[in-house]
Structures are given as C-alpha cells and as structure tokens.
Image (spheres, rainbow, N blue to C red):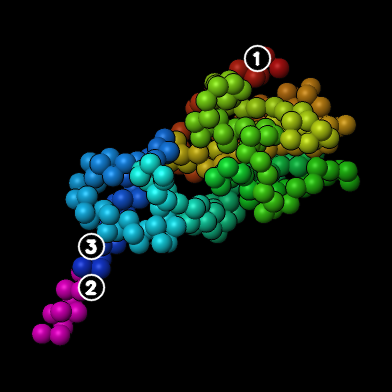
Amino acid sequence: MNDIRSRSASADGVAALDRAIAILDAFASVDKSLSLAEIAARTGLYKSTILRLAGSLLRGQLLERLDDGRYRVGPATFRLGAIYQRSVAAADILLPVMRDLAEQSWESVAFYVRSGDVRTCLYRVESKHPIRYTIREGDVLPLLLGSGGRVLAAFSGEPGEPYETIRATYHHLSVGDRDPETAGVSAPVFGPGRTLLGVLTLAGPSTRVDAAFLRRMTPSLLAAAARATRAFGEDASMLDHARSKTDRHP
C-alpha cells in the first residue's frame, strides 16, 4: 500500500511539473503578458489548476502577476536563460564570432541581453587599441540609450522611431547616444522560432570610431549576427538581406 501511495504521489508531482512547464510554454516571444483565460485556452488546463500552479511559479519568480491581473514571464527565467547562454551557447557560438569581428575591426565587440528595463553585457572581446571603450561583462546599461539597447528594444516590440527603422534594417548606429565619447553599431541575434537572444555591438571611442567607420563595418557586423543566428539553429536570411542592402548603400 505504501509503495502504491508513493508511486501515486510521484506521478502527481511529475504531472504538476508538466502542467507548470505548459503554463510557461504558453508564452510566445511576442507576448508581453497573458490573461488567465488566454493561458487556459493555450494549455487546455482548468483555470483552477493554473491558479494553483501559478502560486508556485510566482514564488519562484518564474511568473509575475501584474496589477491588472494578467501574467508575464518572471525574472528568474532570465537568470536561467543567462546561465544557459553562459554555459553552452555563448562559449560555443558567440565568442568565436565576436573574436573574428574584433580581429577584423580592431574594436571592442560585446553581446548584450535584455533584463526588464535594462540590458546586461554578457560577453565582451576587447579592442586591440590601448585606448578603448570600457564596458565589462556583467555591467548593466540603460535599455533605451545606445545602439545595443535600442536594437534590443526594437525587437522586443518598442513602438515608434527609431525602432520601426531598426526592425526594417536589422541594425542601428549611434554616436554619443548613451555616452558622448562612445559610438557603436548593433545587430540582433536570433534563436529558434525567431526568438531574440541578444545583440552584437561593435563600439569604441568616438574620437576613433566615427559614423563613417561604423557604416563601413555594418556589413561585417550583420554577417557576424547572421553567422551566430544560423549557429543557434534559426534562418538568417533576413540578416543576409539587410547586409546586402548595406553593401549596396554604404
């Protein structure tokens, strides 16, 4: 009898975990939030079941409940994603791409990810110049300033300009936007399902890295973003097309 009860409890626990995973999987990359009814429709679960499991997900910060009663993915998912990127994807895919771009440009290359209303430098390859743009891995920067932040915001759905143009061209160049002495150009990197993973940024001091230099390096940056996107398993034809347009119009 005890063995039967133990197996039953174990099965119930696995089923609850499967349902919790289904709730998180209900969120698509385009969803800022979902209502209880929307989660129920996408998962096929009863609302009472969702509410019960949501309590655990909220405590674990895997979900957040907004003031209007809707739900969004919580900050713990970003932490887990960052751990995954650091342990597998970035080391194997991003760093070789970044090193090649830094070697070609002689400037610093960074990879930023979004975390709420800010962005974090996850990886960085230093410039070969003694005077360089100083951002360290782990530094947190504003989201709506600088080329990297603006590209992250654009492909997270930020409305208006310059975000509409960024979504059309797949890159953004800025000089003195976040820091008056810094200039950079950024492009997005995507994963399966066209999920935005982060942005590649080539940047340096504006005394050396001016708009003309960044425009010359934009095709190489887009090629690097396309290479990383393909390595993550996603079609990169949109980045290749954007690069071909910059090649024609330097």
| Residue 118: % across, % down | 61, 44
Identified by mark 3, the residue type is: Ala
The image quarter in which residue 173 lies: top right
Name the residue at 46% across, 39% down. Answer: 195
Q: Nearer the viewer, mark 1 or mark 2?
A: 2
Residue 124 drawn in magenta: no
Residue assigned mark 2: 10
Identified by mark 2, the residue type is: Ser
Provide the major secondary structure of the magenta segment.
helix
Q: Is residue 164 above or below residue 229?
A: above
Start-end of magenta stretch:
1-11
Name the residue at 31% across, 50% down. Answer: 23
Q: Nearer the viewer, residue 67 or 176?
A: 67
Label 3 or label 2, whichever comes before in sequence order:
2
Identified by mark 1, the residue type is: Arg
In the picture, measured across the screen, residue 178 lies left or right of residue 187, that is: right
Give the Cα separation between the discs numbered 3 and 2: 9 Å
Label 3 secondary element: helix
Label 1 secondary element: helix
The image quarter in which residue 98 lies: top right
Q: Is residue 144 above or below residue 247?
A: below
Q: Residue furthest left?
A: 1
